[in-house]
Amino acid sequence: MKKIFLTIMISLFSLCFMTGCKDEKPTEITISAAASLKNSLGDIIEKFEHENKDIKINVNFGGSGALRNQIIAGAPVDIVFFASQKDLVELEKKGLVDEKYHGDILKNRLVIAGKREISSMEDIIGDKIALGTPETVPAGRYAKQALENAKIWDKIKEDLIYTKDVRSAAQYVDLSEVDYALIYKTDAKILKNTKIVYTIPEELHTPVVYTYAILKGHASDANIKFYDFLSSKEAQKIYKKYNFEMADK
């Protein structure tokens, strides 16, 4: 019996030696994504990795403008998912985007969150307001456009608190560190102590359109597979769960 067992073990060892029994490391994909995508993209990644156990997704969340600047500076990124068309265009101008794999994918709405109900944008004059830094955060850029077009920017600019991304603005208002915050409709999902009190008319700012792309030289099979999954029916169900709209609607 021992001899048979020993023979089996030797055979298994020999097979292991010839074919390589050690576990293969999963293929890693790095994506830079807008902070407003944290929950929806987290769910999408969890589903994708469950179905593709040989692939691991690493995500760097932040303001789209800041992420864009990191990539221009040489950050090692495979896929980008921005909250604006402008930031992707900037990468395209520098020849950093794959010509085949890029496009618009989602739409969002800009809203005002707070505790006290308001009937117009003028009602926030005199209050402390949080918004993303316009130079690096698309939500902040859209918010500034809306405030300027509503003719109240000069009246409130001294009361503004700038944040590193839109999620931070949402947290400021929810913790009562400010009276109001200009955020995305989708960010209302994380609010516990405040709510949407006003939806900003879309004609006051550039449409909120999310774009995504594979960066030039990164169109590997794994990256293409995840890129395609981001617009799949499975992913669309998740986006809608978090109040996003598809860009082609």
Image: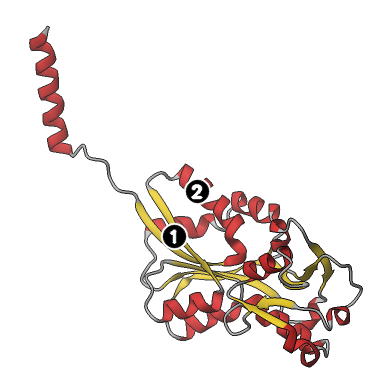
Q: Is residue 14 left or right of residue 117?
A: left
- Quarter the C terminus occupies: bottom right
- Taking the view exactly as shown, the residue that stands out farthest to the top is 1
Q: Is residue 223 above or below residue 139?
A: above
Taking 93 as reference, is 167 left or right?
right
Q: Residue at x 44, y 85 (%)?
A: 94
- Residue placed most toward the observer, 211 or 140: 140
- Left or right position of 198 against 59: right
Closer to the eye: label 2 or 1:
2
Residue 192's quadrant in the figure?
bottom right
The residue positioned farthest toward the bottom in the image shown? 154
- Indicate the secondary structure of the residue bearing disc 1: helix
Residue 229 percent across, percent down from the top left: 52, 54
Residue type pointed to by label 1: Ile
Q: Which residue is mark 2?
A: 48
- Checking the image for residue 224, the label placed there is 1
Q: Specify the quadrant that holds the N terminus.
A: top left
Residue 242 position within the rendered picture, expressed as x and y whole percent measured from the top left: 69, 55
Frontmost residue, 158 versus 131: 158
